[in-house]
Image (cartoon, rainbow, N blue to C red):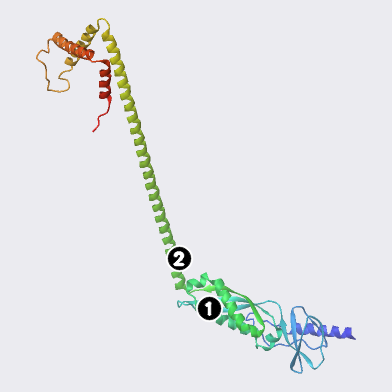
């Protein structure tokens, strides 16, 4: 008997579901009154559905998924609520931004029924109410933002809409999970202005980048010139130092050579026929100097006896002999002291 009743109840339930539309109707996604499952005493509630039962017109209980028994005539299935996540397409609507730009915007709303009792008795049409609330909240949130911020802050805009919907839908037993803006349409003139603004911004960035490149190039060239001048000055300094050191070494070498020549000359003069050799050297130097007269300058001063070479040599040798006699009369100690005095630096 029970088995036959269950079969009959199942058949009637399937026929009622085939002939009667379910909860949510597309494309407007509005709920409307329809025939509900009949009370066949034994009922099988599908998973993720909640059947609200009234007894004599008053709320009695909510049937859980699985096998359930009802009293004929007294019990009636008044509402059937789906506990799955429901997707609602929010129709396109116009909204005015903070800078008075009219936008055409639509979205998608994701919600779920948490309390079947509130969803059944808290509002007449939950889906229609939530859709209207989403549209009004979206217009309100868009009015707080400028056009540029609408495109940059879509995530925060979606979060604000979800928060506003949840504040109002708690009494309906409905929870809004998320809201996503699908498309934002702007007027053609505004779109052209935005395109011009984007092009101007790109030209500005290109100009700035080009100027920065020129600036970096000029800085690099100046740094290169600076380094080149520093290196050139250091090279010139090193060259001058090396040149001065070379000249000093040359002077020392010449002085040492001259001192050595003088020593050799003094040794040669002390030997036999030294005076004759000195006379010959003086005569050669006189002839050489006389041959170079008037080559470097037009003004020439000549002695009265320029043609008498023997007298000039005799005069030079007499001067040399006089100096030699004077130096021989000076004691060796005084000569050394006089040489030390001559070699010592002058003091002020």
- Residue 261 place in picture, x, y as percent: 29, 15
The residue most toward the right is 1
Front residue (pair 73, 123): 123
Looking at the image, is 159 positioned above or below residue 340?
Answer: below
Q: Which type of secondary structure does the marked residue at label 1 adopt?
A: helix
Looking at the image, is 274 positioned above or below residue 336?
Answer: above
State which quadrant residue 269 falls in.
top left
State which quadrant residue 20 falls in.
bottom right
Q: Which residue lies at the image location 57% right of the left edge and 81% below the top edge?
A: 135
Label at residue 198: 2
* Residue density around tag 1, few if under 14, some if 14–19, many if 20 or more, within 10 Å: many
Labels 2, 1: front one: 1
- Residue 293 place in picture, x, y as percent: 16, 18
Q: Is residue 273 left or right of residue 70?
A: left
Q: Which residue lies at the image location 41% right of the left edge and 58% below the top edge?
A: 208
- Residue 330 place in picture, x, y as percent: 23, 15
State which quadrant residue 247 falls in.
top left
Q: Quadrant of the N terminus?
A: bottom right
How far is mark 2 from mark 1, CA to CA? 25 Å
Q: Which residue lies at the image location 31% right of the left edge and 16% below the top edge?
A: 260
- Residue 233 place in picture, x, y as percent: 35, 39
Res. 59 visible in picture: yes
Label at residue 74: none
Q: Quadrant of the C terminus?
A: top left
Q: Which type of secondary structure does the marked residue at label 2 adopt?
A: helix
For disc 1, the marked residue is: 141
* Residue density around tag 2, few if under 14, some if 14–19, many if 20 or more, within 10 Å: few
The residue most toward the left is 304
């Amino acid at each position: 008997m029970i088995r036959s009743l269950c079969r009959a109840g199942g058949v009637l339930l399937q026929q009622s579901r085939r002939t009667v539309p379910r909860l949510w109707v597309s494309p407007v996604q509005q709920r409307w009154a329809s025939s509900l499952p009949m009370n066949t005493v034994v009922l099988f509630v599908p998973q993720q559905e909640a059947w609200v039962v009234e007894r004599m017109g008053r709320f009695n209980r909510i049937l859980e998924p699985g096998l359930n028994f009802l009293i004929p005539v007294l019990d009636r299935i008044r509402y059937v609520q789906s506990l799955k996540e429901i997707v609602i397409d929010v129709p396109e609507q116009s909204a005015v931004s903070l800078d008075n730009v009219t936008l055409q915007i639509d979205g998608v709303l994701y919600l779920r029924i948490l309390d079947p009792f509130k969803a059944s008795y808290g509002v007449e049409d939950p889906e229609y109410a939530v859709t209207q609330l989403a549209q009004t909240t979206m217009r309100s949130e868009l009015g707080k933002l400028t056009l540029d911020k609408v495109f940059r802050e879509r995530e925060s805009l979606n979060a604000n809409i979800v928060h506003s919907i949840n504040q109002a839908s708690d009494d309906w037993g409905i929870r809004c999970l998320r809201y996503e803006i699908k498309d934002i349409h702007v007027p053609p003139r505004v779109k052209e202005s935005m395109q011009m603004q984007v092009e101007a911004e790109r030209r500005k960035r290109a100009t700035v980048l080009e100027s920065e490149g020129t600036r970096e190039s000029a800085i690099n060239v100046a740094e290169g010139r600076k380094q080149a001048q520093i290196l050139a000055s250091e090279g010139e300094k090193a060259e001058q130092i090396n040149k001065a050191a070379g000249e000093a070494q040359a002077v020392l070498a010449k002085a040492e050579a001259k001192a050595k020549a003088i020593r050799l000359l003094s040794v040669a003069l002390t030997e036999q026929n030294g005076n004759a050799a000195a006379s010959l050297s003086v005569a050669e130097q006189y002839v050489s100097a006389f041959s170079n007269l008037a080559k470097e300058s037009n003004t020439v001063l000549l002695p009265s006896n320029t043609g008498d070479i023997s007298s000039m040599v005799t005069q030079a040798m007499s001067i040399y002999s006089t100096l030699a006699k004077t130096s021989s009369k000076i004691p060796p100690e005084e000569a050394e002291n006089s040489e030390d005095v001559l070699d010592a630096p002058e003091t002020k």
